[in-house]
Every structure is written in structure tokens, then in C-alpha cells.
Amino acid sequence: MKLLLRWAIASLALFVAAWLVPGIRVEGSAWFVYAVMAIILGFINAIIRPILKFLSCGLIIITLGLFVLVINGLTLWLSSGIAVNWFHVGFYVDGFWSAFFGALIVSIVSVILSALIKKEEIPRG
């Protein structure tokens, strides 16, 4: 159940990013595209993102963690490329800065929605 909830949160966060960032556009059946893109982004974040964080550990330390935002942008950009070229899903990210701001929005929306859901799960009494 938690996996489905995280998948729905990621899909909604991608929707918000596509809505707010001019360089991110969706073609085709929108909710299907967001759902597939959330799965692809989840796999990229689970497999490639830890490798990128390990390889850039020095930069992350020097920038006090801000380089993680660059890594998030790169993973969104890579996920978009994989979605478009391999799975023919219409989620297009035009450049690095669009990916950077899109990943920033996806992160913020995901944190807020996750916090709201966790807050609702805590029994009051």
C-alpha cells in the first residue's frame, strides 16, 4: 500500500512540475504519462542516484549538500530521456535548467504530500 501511495505522490508531483515549469511538457494521455514517468523516476532514483551521490561525495560536502539539487535535476532529465526514447512516453524536459527547477518542485511537493499523509496516519487519542 505504501508503494502505491508513494507512486501516486510522485505522479502528482510530476504533474505540478509540468504545470509550473515552462520547459517541461507532456504529450499524450497525461495521467498515464505521469504514472509511467513516476515509475521510471523511481527506478532511476533507486539505482543511479546513489551511484551519482557516491561519485560526487566531495562536491556534496563542499557545497553543503546543494549539489544534491543538481543530481536531482540530472536524474529527472535522464528519466525523461529514458521515458521518451525507450518507452515512447511523452514527458519532455527541454534542458538542464528545466530539469533542475522541475526536480526542485517534485522534491518540495513530494515532501509536503508525504508529511501530510504521515500526519493523517498518526492516531490521535
Image: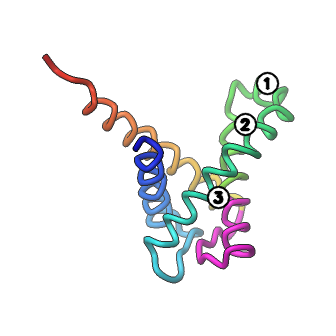
Q: Residue placed at 53% from the left, 81% from the top?
A: 27
Q: Calculate the distance from the C-alpha at mark 3 to the C-alpha at mark 1.
A: 23 Å
Q: Residue placed at 83% from the left, 34% from the top?
A: 56
Query: Mark on residue 42?
Result: none
76 or 118: nearer the viewer: 118
Q: Position of residue 26 (x, y in %)?
A: 53, 75
Q: Is residue 76 magenta?
A: no
Query: Mark on residue 67?
Result: 2
Q: Give the left or right position of residue 6, taking residue 88 as reference.
A: left
Answer whether labels 3 and 1 touch (C-beta < 8 Å). no
Magenta highlight range: 77-95
Q: Position of residue 80 (x, y in %)?
A: 67, 65
Q: Residue placed at 80% from the left, 40% from the top?
A: 52
Inspect the image, locate mark 3, and give the three-letter code of the amino acid beneath it: Ala
**Residue at numbered disc 3:** 99
Quadrant, the N terminus: top left
**Residue at numbered disc 1:** 62
Which residue reaches farthest top? 125
| Element carrying mark 3 | helix
